[in-house]
Structures are given as C-alpha cells and as structure tokens.
Amino acid sequence: MPIAGIYGPDDFANRPQGQHQGQATASPRAAPARTGPTLPTPSLAWTPEVARATAPLYERVKHVIPPIEWPLMAPTILAINELKRARGAVILAHNYQAPEIFHCVADIGGDSLQLAVEATKVKAGIIVQCGVHFMAETSKLLNPDKTVLIPDSRAGCSLAASITGADVRLLREKFPGVPVVAYVNTSAEVKAEVDICCTSSNAVQVVESLGTRSVIFLPDRYLATYVASKTDVKIIAWKGACEVHERFKGEELRAFREADPSVQIIAHPECPPDVLAEADFTGSTAHMINWVRERRPRRLVMITECSMADNVRAELPDVEMLRPCNLCPHMKRITLANILESLLTLREEVTIDPTLADRARRSVERMINLKN
Ligand code: 13P
Ligand code: SF4
C-alpha cells in the first residue's frame, strides 16, 4: 500500500535546536582515545618473504587488484594479519569495504544483519569494525565487555545523521501507541528510543512481527516506501535518505537495458522507487550477493556501492559487471593503513553510555531474536 505519511525535522515546530553526539552530521565525532600499550610499527617493505606469505591472498583478489598495486598493499595486509593474531582481535567487514580489506584481512564479512549476528558470537576480546560508526556501535551494544575499535570514527552515515532521539520522541507524541521500527542505520541514542530494529534483510518481517495496523518506520524514506509496497501495514516514515543510493536514476538503468536487453539489474532497497521499478531483483547487500551466486548472470548491473561489485567480481570473475555504482565516502574512510594503526594503538574505541546502551541493546536483540 502507498506510504501513509513522511515526516521530517521541518514538521515539528517544537523540535529542539542542536543535535546530539555529533550525529546530525554524517560523520560522528571521534570517540575518546583508549590509553593502552601502543606497539611499534612493523616493517612495511615489499620483500620476497612478504610476496610468498601473501601469494594465497593475492589469488583471492587478482581479478580486481592489478599486480602492480599488490606490492603497495601486501606488506600492510601481512602486518595486519600478524598483529590481529598477536592482539587476539577479530575483524568484521561490511560488504562495502574495499577488496583488499574484505578479502584479505577480514575474518567475517557480510551485510548489517550478518555482522550484528556474528558480533554476538565473537570470542576475541577485541573487535575491529571495518564499516561505518553505527555498525561499530551495534557491535559494542552486543559486546559491552569487549573492546570495539573503529579505524576512523568519522565514518558516519547520512541516514544515521538524519534523526535524533528527540525526533523519535516527537514522532511518538504525534502518533501515540504506534510502535517504532528503526533501521540499524541509526545511532545508539535513536535505537534506545524505539521498539525494535531492522535491517534491509528483514524489514518487512520485523514490521509484520509487531501485529499492529500502523508502524512508524525510520529513518530511510525509500526503504520505508519499499516495505510499504510489500505489506498491508500502514507505514509512517521519516525523511532520511542514503546519500549513495538516492543518486541513482531509473533512466540510467533503462539506458543499460536498451544497450543490452539481456542484462540483469539488481538494486538495494535504499534506492528511490523509480530505480527499484527497473530492477530484476531488490534485496539487502547479502541477498544481492546470494542472488548473483545462484543465478550467475552473464552481465550484471549492481545498483549499490562500488566496492561490492569488486568483491563479487573477485569471487565470480565470469560475471561481467557494468557499473553505474556510487562510492560511500564514509565506508571509504576505512583503509589498510588506519586498520593497522588501530591495531597498533587500540584506537579509536567505541564507547556508549551504559544506561542508554541497555535500552538500545533491547531493540537490536529483539530483532536478532525474531524467529525466521
Ligand atoms: P545492508 O544491511 O544491506 O548491508 O545495508 C547497509 C547499508 O548501509 C547499505 O547502504
Ligand atoms: Fe549510510 Fe548510504 Fe553509506 Fe550505507 S551507503 S553507510 S546507508 S551513507
């Protein structure tokens, strides 16, 4: 059914000025630095030993990283992998991380839901989150006693920056009794104010699990529109958007199809409706990857962040990628160099006020505990 209404900051005359914790900008403030033992920087020289030790890793990425670039990356990759073992750390990486991170240093890769679920199973004492700040916060919520590091805490998200906890309270005042679902792309402060979280993998299931006629769904207006098209529950949305996916246009997809009618097009549900109308399949990043693994299309247009196409191509080189992709500037703040730095210095540590964290954790755990 069509969306029941879309609200934003301008719709509330009594909205408090100023924002919380820097989340109103796309890049959150740096977390307090951890004071801990800093290890000396290892040698980052390209030697025959480094070439030998990293050769199996190069096999994984040889279709997407030219041989001339490998000597520039391999010494840092080797140093990260050695340091990770020495520190007893685990690296979680989102599907949008660059191939040298995703395929060469990450222990666990996946979409937001997979990373949240995997975070609950981590045994290591240190988690290095290669993704954006809300993902690191989610890992911290689920591992309050562990050290969660993000290599650059300025890695924000335009969706997380679009809404505050005070906004959620104003929505609740306007729609008393209507439950609130928050996309995980929100700050811990927002998660603390809502009933349950969702990701793009389970958004429809989460909305329907509440058993109500109406639901407030925030902050992504396009994901909300997509969910509304799949359910009879009335969806009240917030005006946020992903700055990466909102830039795609239906007409560019039509141009690809006209050039090659056999091309397959798959898109993330953060895209506007005219884009999704052109897609053969819509799903979360993990669902898109599974779709490609199963279908093995000859030519594919992946309407999402650029690095994901590289990561899929590294695994499935026979799939030809046509790429009108957009880069997420926040995801790209994470680099091999700052992952190494993070492991050497144990910075930047993610911290969340414990009382707020208890409330935010409930919303994430309620999602994780939903039966499939
Ligand atoms: P996924 O949950 O599909 O991985 O999406 C996260 C995200 O930030 C997409 O822009
Ligand atoms: Fe946020 Fe969009 Fe970047 Fe995903 S791609 S982290 S939704 S800005």
Image (tube, rainbow, N blue to C red):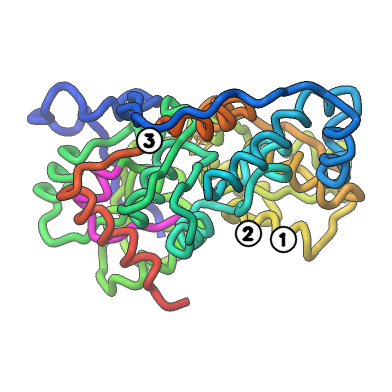
Choose the circle earlier in sequence order: 2 or 3. Answer: 2
* Residue visible at 76% across and 48% down in the picture: 312
Confirm or deny contact between disc 1 and disc 2 (CB under 8 A).
yes
According to the picture, the residue beneath numbered tag 2 turns out to be 287
- Give the Cα distance between marks 2 and 3: 31 Å
- Give the Cα distance between marks 1 and 3: 36 Å
Is 193 left or right of 50, judged from the image as shown?
Answer: left
> Which residue is nearer to you in this view: 304 or 364?
364
According to the picture, the residue beneath numbered tag 1 turns out to be 291
Residue 328 image point, x, y percent: 57, 30
- Give the Cα distance between marks 1 and 2: 6 Å
> Which residue is nearer to you in this view: 72 or 286?
72
Residue 209 image point, x, y percent: 34, 72
Residue 332 image point, x, y percent: 58, 28
Q: Secondary structure at mark 2?
A: helix
Which numbered mark, 2 or 3, is in the foreground of this view?
3
Identity of the residue furthest to the bottom in this view: 371
Q: Report the amino acid beneath label 1.
A: Trp
Instruction: Tell me if the residue at label 1 has its CB under 8 Å from ligand 1.
Output: no
Q: On residue 349, which mark appears?
A: 3
Q: Secondary structure at mark 1?
A: helix
* Residue visible at 68% across and 34% down in the picture: 79
Q: Report the amino acid beneath label 2.
A: His
> Which residue is nearer to you in this view: 366 or 143?
143
Which numbered mark, 1 or 3, is in the foreground of this view?
3
Instruction: Tell me if the residue at label 2 has its CB under 8 Å from ligand 1.
Output: yes
Residue 299 appears in the rendering: no
Confirm or deny contact between disc 2 and disc 3 (CB under 8 A).
no
Q: Report the amino acid beneath label 3.
A: Glu
